[in-house]
Each structure stands twice: as structure tokens, then as C-alpha cells.
Image: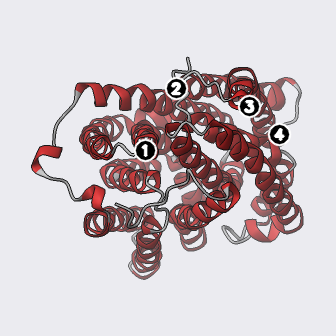
Amino acid sequence: MKDHTTDMTTGDPVRHIILFAIPALIGNVFQQIYNIADSIIVGRFVGASALAAVGATSSITFLFFALCNGIGSGGGIIVSQFYGAHENDKVKNCIVNTGFIMLIIPLLFGTLGFISAPSLLRLLNTPAEILGDAAMYIRYMCIGLLFVSLYNYLASMLRALGDSKSPLYFLIVSTIINVFLDILFVYRYNMGIRGAACATIISQFTAAVCCGVHAYRINPYFRLRKEDFVISIEMSYKIVRLGVPMSLQFALIAISSMALQRVVNSFGTVVVAAFTATNRIEQLIHQPYTTLGASLATYCGQNYGARKYDRVYTGYKKGILIMGILTVVMMIVMQVFGGAITSLFVSDPKVIALGAMGLRINSTFYFALGMIYVVRGVLTGVGDAFFALFNGVIEVIGRFTLPLILTSFLGLGATGIWLSTGFVWILSGVTAWMRYYTHLNSSLTKENVVHSLQ
């Protein structure tokens, strides 16, 4: 069973990490182009208010995506550990049980989000002039939640087996479809935000279906027999035990983003539009760090399963080095070209100036952001379920308190919005490093790891 899989328990760690991360990075960038294409086309062809309406939904839709995708990520880590230990039957059983859970959860949360969309937007103080469009956009995203979750589940399983290329191919195709349909629906047929939402749903459906068919055809672990379809309480518990804290971590981050969005909304449509533009760009900036963390999670998961703890420690050190190089490059780009990049989204000079300022502020904190992903990747790979939830709690505390302190009590106004994001990254990065250093570092260097981190 070597086809379309990669065994990371032997060979050069840096080579494994980079070769795995590059296709995943390209795939994540294309996935973000979904949102960026919507924002650029809506902002340019419909207007700043429409861009603000789409942006006002981002924290809410992220909440529902996060609640679903954490389970898939948790299942992926367990698959990587079984694969590293060469327990092939358990790999298949984990794929089956994760898939069953991933069918139920998006249907549940998609229904909940569809019903509660207007109430959630009012809770965030969404400006009245964009409330109707924002609620409509959320409801369309909830319809597409099943397709997003299924694609991310399949991608997590494939990546856990060392195949980061296959998910990339279908993301590229679906992104091209999304951009084409965005232009067709929004520009040609004047469907506005509704058109952008429909384009996203169709492209997400395409990615999920094509990835599933391809996985069955090329990956032997997906050629499941009747006897593989066993719902195991023990396996489901393992998946839920790791996946639920990850879901809760992502959910807490989403809730903290909603708290920040509430502060942003209080400054009016111009600030909301500027924040939306910078937020879309920041989502793109997150992708190199995200893929590095995912690569480390798979690498560390396989080596942890094989009990090669010295290689886990080496992966951590090399991950910090790679992250530092990425940080310097991205920080320079944002400092020099922040205004030009923001102008891609909107033509309003006030929005562009405010967005450029926000990018310059946030880029000075990128190293702290990268540290979060590196440490999180290592800890997730070895199955540290506690840290994911704890780190999410820390971020929620920061997101709820720092924006109010900086914008109101210290009188920094809109500038405090972007400063608060940077300070939250520092807070989360430091706590992530402390968790690694106090609970894992000495164990890895001594090759004496406790298998159930609590």
C-alpha cells in the first residue's frame, strides 16, 4: 500500500516537511481565493456596502465551518499515527468512522446557522443597511456547509497518509469554476451577493465530489470493503476525543473573531469594508503558516506513531527555521505593498488608506503568528488534545478584552482594531511555546514520551 502515500518516518525531515507543505500551501491559497474572489468581485462590481455585508459574515461562517472541520482534522491525526505504526486495518476503520461523523455534524450545524443567521448578525451590531444581504449570504454558506466539510474531511485523510497533492488538483479546478461563476453571476447577470454565494456553493460541491471519486480510484485505503464499514465505539471515541477539543478551539477562535467583528461594526461601513479587505489578505497570509503546521502535524503524527521521538524534536526545530524565513518575506511585502494590495478589493481612497495601515501594523507581529502554527502542529501531531482547547480559551480572552481596551479605554480608535490582533497573536504564541516547553520538549529530547498527554 505505497501508492499515493508518503512514509515520513525515514529520510530527511526538512525535505518531508517542505515537499508535503508546498502542494498543501498551493491548495490552501486556492481555497482562500474562494473568499478573495467573492470580495474583489463584489467590492468592485457591487460596491463598498456589499463588500462590508460579505465581510460581516466571515466570523459567523467560520464558526460553523470550525465546528465541523475540527473532527475531520482530529481523525486525520489519528490516521497518520496508525499509518506510521503500519496498522492498516485501523487506518481504514478510522476513515470510515470519521466519515460517518462528518456527515452528521454539518447537517446539524448548517440547519442551526440557517435559522439563527439574522439573530447572530444583530448580536454583532451589524449595520442595518447591510443586515439583509449579510443574512442571505450566511444562509447560502450554511447550505454549502456539507460540501465544505466533506472536502476538508477527504483532504485531511489524504494528507494524513502523506498525499498533499491530490486535494490540490481539485481545489484548483473548483477555484477556477468559482471565479468564472462569480464573474458570470455578479457582473454579467447582476445577481449581486446572491450570485457570489451561488458560485461558491457550486464550486465547493465540485471539489467534494471530485476529490471523493479520485480518492477511491487512486488510494488503496479508500477502496473499502463491506467489512470495513464498522461503526466502532472505541474508534469514534478516539476521533471525538481529539477532534472535539480541536473543534472547540476553532470555535472559540471564531467566537473571539465575532467579538472583534462587533467592535469593528461599531465604527461604521468604511471601517468594516477596510477590515474586510485586510482580513481577506490576512487569511492568505495565514496559509504558509497553516500548511507548515499541517505538515508538521502529519510528520510528527507518523513519527510519534512509529515511536521515533528524536525525529519529532528535529521537526520542531526545522519548523521554526522555515517559519522565520517565511515571516521575513511576508512582512516586507506587506510593509511595502500594503496599499496596492488593498486597492485590489475596493476603489474608495479612505478604505484603501485604512486597510494599508492595518496591514503594516499586523505584519510586525507575523513571527508570533507563525509560532502558534508551528507549536500547534507539533502538539497536534502527538495527540495533545488539551492544548487545542486551552489555546482557544486564551485567544477568546484576548479578543474580548484587547479590542475594547485599545479602541475605547486607550482612545486609539480604529487603529486599535489591528493592534489588538497583533497582541492576541503574541499572547497565543507565548502560551503555545510554554505548553510545548513544559510538557513535551524534555520528553522528546530524552525519547521518553508519555503517550497520553493530558
- Which quarter of the figure has residue 284? bottom right
Q: Which residue is mark 4?
A: 419
**Residue at position x 30%, y 40% in the image:** 90
Q: From the viewer's perspective, is the residue at label 3 or at label 2 nearer?
A: 3
Quarter of the image for the C terminus: give it. top right
Q: Residues within 10 Å of mark 4 (few under 14, many from 20)?
A: many
Rendered image quadrant of residue 208: bottom left
Which residue appears at 46% of the width and 55% of the height?
Answer: 159
Residue identified by numbered label 2: 385
Mark toward the viewer: 3 or 1? 3
Nearer-N-terminus badge (4/1): 1
Q: Earlier in the sequence, mark 3 or mark 2?
A: 2
Which class describes the residues within 10 Å of circle 3: few (<14), some (14-19), or many (20+)?
Answer: some
Q: Which numbered dot is residue 445?
A: 3
Asked whether the residues under the numbered discs 3 and 1 touch, taking CB atoms below 8 Å apart as contact, a structural biologist would say no
Question: Are dots 4 and 3 in contact, CB under 8 Å?
Answer: no
Q: Is residue 264 visible?
A: no
Q: Is 432 situated above or below 79?
A: above
The residue at the far left in this view is 226
- Image position, residue 49 (x, y; %): 58, 57
Q: Quadrant of the N terminus?
A: bottom left
User: Judging from the image, what secondary structure is the residue with disc 3 in?
Assistant: helix
Vertical placement of residue 216 versus 289, above or below:
below
According to the image, label 1 marks what residue?
76
Instruction: Name the N-terminal-most of marks 3 and 1.
Output: 1
In the structure shown, which secondary structural element does the residue marked by tag 2 occupy? helix
Whichever of callouts 4 and 2 sits on the residue coming sooner in the sequence is 2
Q: Amino acid at mark 4?
A: Leu
Find residue 442 and report its image quarter.
top right
- Vertical placement of residue 74 versus 437, above or below: below
Query: CA separation, marks 3 and 2?
Result: 21 Å
